[in-house]
Image: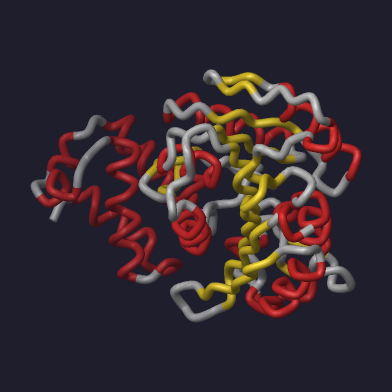
Amino acid sequence: MSKLYSHIRQMLSPSCGEHEARAIAFVLLDDVCGLSRTDVLMDRDDELDEPTRQCILSLAQRIADGEPLQYVTGTALFDGLKVGVAPGVLIPRPETEELVAAVSQPVLPAGTVVIDVCSGSGCIALALKHRMPQTVVVGVDVSEPALAIAADNAVRLGLDVDFRKMDVLNDAEWDRLAVWLATATADGWDCKQTETTNTGRHVGLIVSNPPYVCDSEREDMESLVLDHEPHIALFVPDADPLLFYRTITRNAHRLLMDGGVLAFEINRRFGAEMAQLLRDEGFSGVGVMQDAFGNDRIVTGVWRLSEK
């Protein structure tokens, strides 16, 4: 086995464990140098020049010191896409990939508007646009650094997603979003409407993975997350754990068309409470889905104008 690969493994094993150290070594050599696993097994990493070797070892040291791999490399794989990430956004999780898979079936009709609320890196919005290129996808977030990362991801991936700044806890900003949606034109999408009571009702899907970790859960979290990922995107007060969900749900049904879907990734502790919240706000067909580990993780509901 090559000396460089072995050196990286030795650096990482004490903090990451041998199995993860091997995996990270392959990822580093691939992401930074474009060397495949086969290249490494054929010792081609030993052909790298000294500045490149030192760069790789410097990155490996950052990981050994406790920095997340994805922030070190600047990328994370999500639903088949290589998404750019930085400390200003959360690192995408596999559970969120399950949310994307759930809401993209069945495939939405051409021209359907999709809104990703609390978009962060834009991973959900971008993955949905990649899966359903015929839709019009908009991502909103309050963080300007996150929006910059999301917009850069859209350009780099060649996916036409519109990212906009919005404080989702401010009802007035939902009013502004409704007005913008009613007058926006993009990719031949003309949704100008004359009836103000119908403003924005061309939205077929609103999806969100908002902050949902209770403050009291901090003590159970790994330092890898607590010391590096943005707390504004993670935590909610213990006294109001459904803060974001309640505001989003209350405003979502003002935008959704008949049969439109609202879907959330949730804290596994609040599956029943979330289902009841959607029912209380007038959604029908409310369902709770479990993730790969059997935890309540996704809640969906359908907005039926005919029932109002």
Q: In the image shown, does 275 or 22 lie closer to the viewer?
A: 275
Say which residue appears at 58% left-offset and 23% top-offset. 189
Q: In the image shown, does 76 or 278 lie closer to the viewer?
A: 278
Decide if residue 263 is on the left or right side of residue 249.
left
Count of all numbered marks drawn on residues in the image: 0
- Which of the 4 image quarters holds residue 141? top right
Decide if residue 109 is on the left or right side of residue 228.
left
Say which residue appears at 79% left-offset and 58% top-offset. 308
Say which residue appears at 20% left-offset and 44% top-offset. 36
Where is residue 84 drawn, in percent x and y?
Answer: 49, 38
Where is residue 221 drawn, in percent x and y?
Answer: 64, 71
Whether residue 74 is visible here, answered yes or no, is no
Whether residue 263 is visible here, answered yes or no, is yes
Decide if residue 158 is on the left or right side of residue 185.
left
**On screen, residue 122 above or below 26:** above
**On screen, residue 108 above or below 1:** above
Say which residue appears at 77% left-offset and 40% top-offset. 142
Q: In the image shown, does 139 or 63 lie closer to the viewer?
A: 139
Where is residue 136 drawn, in percent x and y?
Answer: 55, 32
The residue lying furthest to the front in this view is 306
Where is residue 124 drawn, in percent x and y?
Answer: 54, 47
- Which of the 4 image quarters holds residue 242? bottom right
Q: Which colour scheme appears in the figure? A: secondary structure
**On screen, residue 106 above or below 223:** above
Q: Quadrant of the N terminus?
A: bottom left
Decide if residue 135 is on the left or right side of residue 29.
right
